[in-house]
Amino acid sequence: MPLRSTGSRTMPPDPVRHPLFARCYARFSVAAETRTGVAGVRERLLAGLSGRVLEIGAGNGLNFAHYPGAVSEVVAVKPERLPRRRAVAAALRAEVPVDVVPGCAEALPVKSEAYDAVVLSLVLCGVRDVPRAPAEVRRVLRPGGEVRFFEHGRGGGRAMALTQRALDRTVWPLLSGGCHLARDPVAALRDAGFRLGPYRRVLMPPTGPVLPASYCSLGTAWRPPAADGAG
């Protein structure tokens, strides 16, 4: 589909830059679609969406092929230039209109209460300001709008929790583009004032060794309607 973001305008410097990780992730993420079942997770994540959708942390644009036809527009925000270029290429192949724009989760470059849904896909693990990102999601959602999330975070028993925290304090963020293992994305959404809908814990990959990054949450949350006094 044609994009509104393919002009030659001058772009500001990227707010986040992890060029080596971006190149590695581009290869790994494509392979993971079939080998670890991520493509099926994307289908469940996006099923039933409609109207205007904001996707934060669009990566290489692998979600774009899974949006249902009832979606009238997707605005996909990505801070880094290299994966953003790949996302633009994926947008051209999508069956719904997709506009790929620069920006970060803590300062979304869109108007308030402008979207029917926001999609978070492996985003909150890497943001620099965890409370700020869900607050921005709440700002841009219309009252009653929904968040679809697929996020990894803390999980397992005490030994795994200690391992996740130790990796977060040492090598993991350096090796994985600022990612953190021990965050709690569900709690972050709850603390931002969202009402949690159905969600479930899933392991990725679903078979094989359980790794520190295997513990994921897949589900829905809502911004309360304005009538509830929580606008």
Image (spheres, helix red, strand yellow):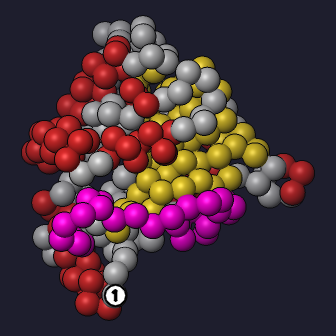
Residue at the image position 19 percent from the left and 66 percent from the top: 208
Asked whether residue 48 is drawn in magenta, I would say no
From the top left corner, tell me how far across and down residue 91 is, in percent.
36, 20
**Residue 144 percent coordinates (x, y):** 75, 46
Query: What residue sits right under mark 1 in the picture?
Result: 157
* Residue at x 24%, y 26% (from the top left corner): 86
x 40%, y 28%: residue? 64
In which quarter of the view is residue 189 placed?
Answer: bottom right
Q: Amino acid at mark 1?
A: Gly
- Compared with 166, 10 (above or below) is above
Q: Quadrant of the N terminus?
A: top left
Q: Is residue 19 visible?
A: no
- Is residue 83 visible in this depiction of the protein? yes
Q: Is residue 198 left or right of residue 22?
A: right
Q: Is residue 114 above or below residue 164?
A: above
Foreground pick, 187 / 110: 187
- Tell me how many marks there are: 1
The residue under the point 39% across, 34% down is: 63
Residue 80 location (% of width, % of height): 27, 37
Above-or-below relation of 25 to 53: below
Bin the neighbour count of mark 1 within 10 Å (Cα to Cα): few under 14, some 14-19, many 20 and up: few
Question: Which secondary structure, mark 1?
Answer: loop
In front of the other: 77 or 44? 44
Q: Which residue extends farthest bottom?
A: 158
Tell me residue 32's x, y (percent): 21, 46
Q: Residue furthest right?
A: 227
* Horizontal side of residue 39 vs 137, given as left or right: left
Q: Which stretch is magenta?
A: 185-212
